[in-house]
Amino acid sequence: MIQEATTDLSERRRTMSDDQGITIRNAAPRDYRRVLAVVDDWWGGRVMSHCLSRVFFEHFTTTSFVAESGDRLVAFLTGFLSQTFDREAYVHFVGVSPERRREGVASALYDRFCSVAKANGCTIVRSSTSPINRMSIAFHLAAGFRMEPGNGDFEGVPVRLDYPLPGEARVLFTRNLAARRLLVEDGLVRGLLAS
Ligand SMILES: CC(C)(COP(=O)(O)OP(=O)(O)OC[C@H]1O[C@@H](n2cnc3c(N)ncnc32)[C@H](O)[C@@H]1OP(=O)(O)O)[C@@H](O)C(=O)NCCC(=O)NCCS
């Protein structure tokens, strides 16, 4: 049985949610159509909706989240715990409304996901993104992920070829939950964070 995480969000992220009236909760089946209605728009017109299955909103709700401000959808994250590798978890999609970006919302969603992963014994979180998605690459690097070496190169970025589908390529990310991360604010190292 998947364990719910105890609340161990960093103080910074808890403050973010409180200050900005954003709440994060587990995804539910009723959220699927709301998310589907915005996902292509949030990805700048890229058609992503066909990649986002209802399965996450029914069978992976312990590791999938929505962020709301009142009844307004602000962000979502879908992910799962690997059944093949019992110390690994995988973030499938994360998206934040364009008008609420750079407020720490995606970071807060990742914190929630990583807390659940840790509570279930995971030490590695994986994710992937398209090599053209530079904001996603910047976000993942800021969130303490590193890029996997891959077997191809896209404009200097290492990619795994034919992943997740034949003819496609993705940057693969890994974050070690056992490692501690630097807290960097305004370009200065302010301290160490539990991962
Ligand atoms: C990528 C995305 C999820 C980031 O969400 P967010 O809530 O804005 O991210 P955060 O505010 O938590 O950002 C944390 C840090 O990541 C980095 N970062 C995030 N977006 C960035 C951008 N566009 N350019 C450069 N760095 C960025 C910054 O270091 C940021 O810290 P700072 O704001 O203090 O400088 C959001 O831009 C998005 O939804 N994009 C479209 C969907 C997508 O590409 N999803 C990811 C692939 S599944």
Image (cartoon, helix red, strand yellow):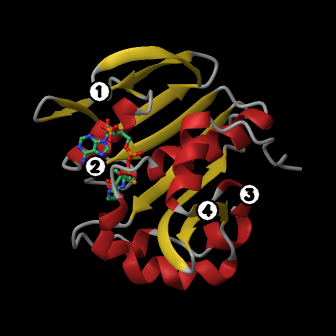
Name the kind of residue labelled 3 in the image.
Answer: Thr
Separation of residues labelled 1 and 2 (CA atoms):
27 Å
Residue receiving disc 3: 62
| 119 displayed left or right of 38 | right
Name the kind of residue labelled 4 in the image.
Answer: Thr
Residue receiving disc 4: 23
User: Mark 4 CB in 8 Å range of ligand 1?
Assistant: no
User: Mark 3 CB in 8 Å range of ligand 1?
Assistant: no
Disc 1, SS = loop
Mark carried by residue 130: 2
N-terminal-most mark, 4 or 3: 4
Location of residue 13 in the rendering, given as x and y in whole percent from the top left corner? 55, 42
Nearest the viewer among 190 and 80 is 190
The residue located at (34%, 40%) in the rendering is 139
Name the kind of residue labelled 1 in the image.
Answer: Asp
Residue receiving disc 1: 186
Name the kind of residue labelled 2 in the image.
Answer: Ser
Separation of residues labelled 4 and 3 (CA atoms):
16 Å
Mark carried by residue 9: none
